Image (tube, coloured by chain):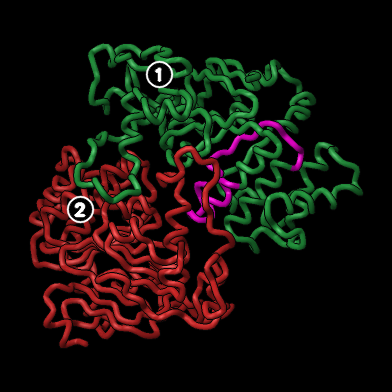
Chain colours: A green, B red
């Protein structure tokens, strides 16, 4: 498989304003040294709990957020070295689907003008071809083109998410970051949208970076999965390998915490991990997971473990392996 | 009806033919339509459905927490310990709220008061319902925080809600719901929806442990079939204001009888049948508008089994097994 995106040691830090004069300026390390590759045509899932930096990672990869350190290469060229003009050009091939279909569509614009905007900004089509393209886009995502003169509030959540997808498709991209694209939807609608994303991928061989907190959704849609915890990747591998042979204690915690949809056997529940997710402003020393880890050793409090390949294509950062 | 319920010691709460409408400027929204069910003593009943199905409105009708107006309980009876709660005055219902019928809300940050210490907020519940001193109430609050496994409860009682994490806040809310000496019914309205999955697992376990310790019934409102599978004894499935299926939890997951229940289970990517599959069996279409909804089966427009009769009238109840009822014209005809 051909490499599409290369991310190396990426860091995105935010400085937090002190609340009073005594306080020092704090740094929130949302993404703190993340490396991975995305291959053409794959669906790479990123799963983690709130505050683990998965959304910031998705945004930094598209240069919607400024990186602090590290490298993001798209088809071999560093997107942080690009000039404004080059960046704008590359944006046509990298798009994003946002989480909240309510706040990501301008409430004062008709659907046709929301979908028209990317085409106009990038001069992608001659003016007279735009209406035809909009009809085609709406048709593609399963909305009747006759609704194109309606406003976002006239649609349900699922339909709005379809419009958000149509907007991402407008420029015929090859790489799409889906940031919690189905999280705000009811489960029956969520299933429709997941199917739609997969159908579109079949048709146009998109590459998705699929970010979500819902393990079952990520497991279903992805080819490979990365698990994030407090700004770092703790484990990644092929989906099947991760399902059957997850090694990192946090991945194990995530799998056992996820409610099964089979009520049988709930009496002999698996052990669950206690404690809260620490603040990313002042993460624990050593391995960030050690305060909650049931199998921690002395070294875990001192050193952050290195990422090791435990099986072909299966990496984990844990002192146990 | 009243006599029958008074004699039945098993049943704690009984909702009969509840109809709740919201009278808005656009018209009447029929949020809940002739919903009936019982909650037995000591059981966890899950009310499950998607947004707008009327599950929260049903639960809020019990405590009469529906904003009225625009809401209006147009019909129905809600018996709790033999008394019809809907016939009580505002003053009388207040004696039940927070005492015999307590509530956990979805978003602990907005349901706790940000300017009071959590110890004080829990102590307030005691002082509202019982004549005890401030000191005594505070001590009881600390004991409750210990019961819900908040570390160092004595000092945590002095914290303000914003100083606690999401999971801790939800624990504090549960402590508050337990503040009555014998909580009869705890209504948990999406208690874990705002939480991360590892924290959700902790809270669900806590609720299970508390239920084993204290004899209480739980009415669990949720949209998450996973949470239902983990906690419920019995399940009522609601769709567009109607009750469409009621069953014991194992029956529901193993033999779903209503096309909507089946569709809901099939929509879950975690469903075991999707191992190695690349598409989900999604329910097509969308929920009908509650303003214009007709008297027939509300699922008719999305149902692949729908026949002419489904567009004419709402089906009668069919009891396929003792305790497993389905409201569908096509019962038994799904393959």
State left or right for residue B300 relative to residue B148.
Answer: right
Is A215 colored magenta in this rendering?
A: no
Instruction: Please tell me which residue is depicted at 78% across the width and 23% down the height of the picture.
Output: A86
For mark 1, what is the residue?
A316
- Please identify, in this view, whether the residue under mark 2 or under mark 1 is nearer the observer: 1
Q: Is residue B40 above or below residue A262?
A: below
Q: Quadrant of residue B176?
A: bottom left
Residue A162 can be seen, yes or no: yes
State left or right for residue B313 relative to residue B2.
Answer: right
Instruction: Please tell me which residue is depicted at 19% across the width and 60% down the height of the picture.
Output: B124
Residue A26 at x, y percent in the picture: 43, 25
Q: Give the chain letter at badge 2.
A: B
Residue A252 at x, y percent in the picture: 32, 30
Q: Secondary structure at mark 1?
A: strand
Residue A3 at x, y percent in the picture: 64, 19
Extent of the magenta region: A170-195
Crowding at mark 2 (Cα within 10 Å: few <14, some 14-19, many 20+): many
Is A186 colored magenta in this rendering?
A: yes
Residue B25 can be seen, yes or no: no
On whether disc 2 and disc 1 are found on a single subunit, the reply is no
For mark 2, what is the residue?
B175
Instruction: Please tell me which residue is depicted at 64% across the width and 35% down the height of the picture.
Output: A176
Residue B258 at x, y percent in the picture: 42, 66
Q: Secondary structure at mark 2?
A: helix
Viewer-nearest residue: A260 or B66: A260
- Quadrant containing the N terminus of chain B in the rendered view: bottom left
The answer to whether the residue labelled 2 contacts the one labelled 1, judged by CB atoms less than 8 Å apart, is no
Q: Is residue A207 above or below residue B38?
A: above
Crowding at mark 1 (Cα within 10 Å: few <14, some 14-19, many 20+): many
Q: Quadrant of residue A49?
A: top left
How many marks do you count on the picture?
2
Instruction: Please tell me which residue is depicted at 38% across the width and 61% down the height of the picture.
Output: B256
């Amino acid at each position: 498989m051909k490499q599409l995106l290369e991310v190396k040691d990426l860091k995105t830090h935010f400085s937090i304003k002190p609340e009073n004069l005594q306080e020092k300026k704090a740094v929130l390390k949302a993404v703190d040294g993340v490396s991975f590759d995305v291959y053409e045509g794959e669906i790479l899932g990123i799963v983690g709990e709130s505050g683990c930096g998965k959304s910031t990672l998705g945004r930094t990869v598209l240069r919607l957020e400024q990186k602090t350190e590290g490298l993001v290469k798209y088809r071999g060229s560093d997107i942080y070295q690009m000039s404004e003009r080059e960046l704008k050009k590359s944006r046509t091939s990298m798009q994003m689907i946002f989480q909240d279909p309510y706040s990501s569509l301008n409430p004062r614009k008709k659907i046709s003008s929301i979908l028209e905007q990317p085409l106009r900004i990038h001069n992608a089509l001659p003016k007279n071809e735009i209406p035809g393209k909009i009809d085609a886009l709406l048709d593609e995502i399963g909305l009747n083109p006759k609704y194109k003169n309606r406003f976002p509030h006239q649609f349900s959540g699922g339909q709005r998410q379809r419009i958000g997808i149509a907007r991402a498709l407008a420029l015929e991209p090859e790489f799409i970051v889906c940031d919690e694209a189905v999280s705000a939807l009811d489960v029956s609608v969520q299933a429709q949208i997941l199917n739609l994303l997969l159908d579109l991928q079949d048709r146009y061989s998109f590459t998705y970076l699929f970010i979500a907190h819902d393990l079952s959704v990520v497991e279903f849609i992805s080819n490979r999965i990365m698990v994030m915890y407090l700004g770092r990747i703790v484990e990644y591998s092929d989906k099947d390998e991760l399902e059957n042979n997850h090694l990192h204690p946090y991945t194990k915690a995530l799998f056992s915490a996820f409610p099964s949809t089979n009520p049988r056997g709930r009496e002999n529940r698996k052990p669950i991990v206690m404690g809260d997710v620490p603040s990313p402003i002042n993460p624990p020393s050593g391995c960030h997971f050690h305060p909650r880890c049931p199998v921690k050793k002395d070294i875990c409090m001192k050193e952050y473990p290195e990422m090791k390949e435990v099986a072909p294509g299966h990496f984990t950062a844990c002192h146990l392996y | 009806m009243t006599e029958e319920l008074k004699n039945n010691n098993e049943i704690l709460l009984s909702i009969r033919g509840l109809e709740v409408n919201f009278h808005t400027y656009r018209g009447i929204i029929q949020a809940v339509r002739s919903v009936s069910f019982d909650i037995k003593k000591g059981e966890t009943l899950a009310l499950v459905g998607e947004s707008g199905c009327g599950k929260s409105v049903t639960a809020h009708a019990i405590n009469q927490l529906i904003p009225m107006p625009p809401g209006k309980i147009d019909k129905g009876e809600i018996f709790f310990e033999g008394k019809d709660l809907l016939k009580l005055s505002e003053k009388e219902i207040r004696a039940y709220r927070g005492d015999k019928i307590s509530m956990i809300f979805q978003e602990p940050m907005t349901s706790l008061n940000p300017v009071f210490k959590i110890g004080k907020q829990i102590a307030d519940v005691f002082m509202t319902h019982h004549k005890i001193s401030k000191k005594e109430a505070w001590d009881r609050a600390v004991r409750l925080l210990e019961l819900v496994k908040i570390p160092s409860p004595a000092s945590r009682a002095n914290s303000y809600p914003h100083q606690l994490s999401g999971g801790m806040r939800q624990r504090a809310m549960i402590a508050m719901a337990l503040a009555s000496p014998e909580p009869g019914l705890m209504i948990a309205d999406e208690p874990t929806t705002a939480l991360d999955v590892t924290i959700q697992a902790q809270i669900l376990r806590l609720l299970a442990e508390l239920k084993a310790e204290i004899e209480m019934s739980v009415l669990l409102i949720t949209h998450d079939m996973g949470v239902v599978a983990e906690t419920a004894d019995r399940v009522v499935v609601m769709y567009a204001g109607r009750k469409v299926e009621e069953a014991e939890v194992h029956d529901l997951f193993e033999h779903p009888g209503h096309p909507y229940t089946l569709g809901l289970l099939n929509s879950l990517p975690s469903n075991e049948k999707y191992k190695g599959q690349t598409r989900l069996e999604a329910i097509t279409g969308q929920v009908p508008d509650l303003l214009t909804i007709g008297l027939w089966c509300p699922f008719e427009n999305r149902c692949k089994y729908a026949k002419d009769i489904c567009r004419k009238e709402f089906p009668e109840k069919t009891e396929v097994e003792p305790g497993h009822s389905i409201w569908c014209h096509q019962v038994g005809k799904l393959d």
